Image: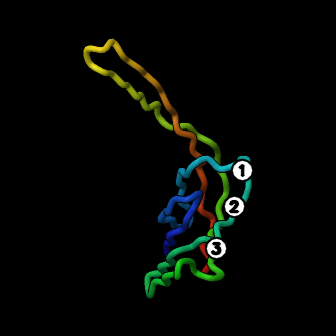
Amino acid sequence: MYAIVEIAGQQFKVEKDTKICVNRLDQKEGDKLTFDKVLLIDDGKSPKVGTPVIAGAKVSATVLGHLRGDKVLIFKKKRRKGYQKLNGFRHSFTQIKIEDIKG
């Protein structure tokens, strides 16, 4: 059984007991979350598709921790002008574990 759920503006395919990394959420480690924007649920027999969401469907999850992604270097240069710029960036993630899918 899996579901497609919208979390923080992005869509994720989730199954029970899987861990996913989503954009940083303002929750603490160990907090319980409930996502109401369930777009699709497939139990292997017949999928339920929402218009745009399935009424009464919920996905519950637990926050495992907060992570930071790999550093991405942004290098800009204009040739023959003496212009060089180097910036670094690390994306912040929240790792969550899917506990239950109801719908």
Image coordinates for residue 2, horizontal then vertical, percent: 49, 72
Vertical side of 15 occupied by 79: above or below: above
Left or right position of 80 against 18? left
Check if mark 1's residue and mark 3's residue have beta carbons within 8 Å. no
Tell me residue 64's x, y (percent). 64, 49
**Which three-letter amino acid code belongs to the residue tagged 1?**
Gln
* Circle 1 SS class: loop
Q: Amino acid at mark 2?
A: Leu
Residue picked out by circle 2: 33
Amino acid tagged 3: Lys
- Residue under the point 59% across and 62% down: 98
Q: Residue furthest bottom?
A: 46
Disc on the earlier residue, 3 or 2: 2
Q: Quadrant of residue 59?
A: bottom right
Residue at image mark 1: 27
Label 3 sits on a secondary structure element that is: strand
Quadrant showing the C terminus: bottom right
First in sequence: mark 1 vs mark 3: 1
Crowdedness near tag 1: few (<14), some (14–19) or many (≥20) residues, C-alpha within 10 Å: some
Circle 3: is it few (<14), some (14-19), or many (20+) Cα within 10 Å?
some
Picture quadrant of residue 6 = bottom right
Secondary structure under the numbered disc 2 in the rendered image: strand
Determine crowd level at label 2: few under 14, some 14-19, many 20+ residues with C-alpha closer than 10 A: some
In screen coordinates, is 33 left or right of 15?
A: right
Q: Nearer the viewer, residue 1 or 39?
A: 39
Q: In terms of image quadrants, where is residue 9?
A: bottom right
Q: State the image coordinates of residue 36 (x, y, percent, origin top left).
A: 64, 71
The residue where tag 3 is placed is 58
* Residue 57, label in figure: none
Q: Check whether the beta carbons of the residues at disc 1 and disc 2 lie within 8 A of each other.
A: yes
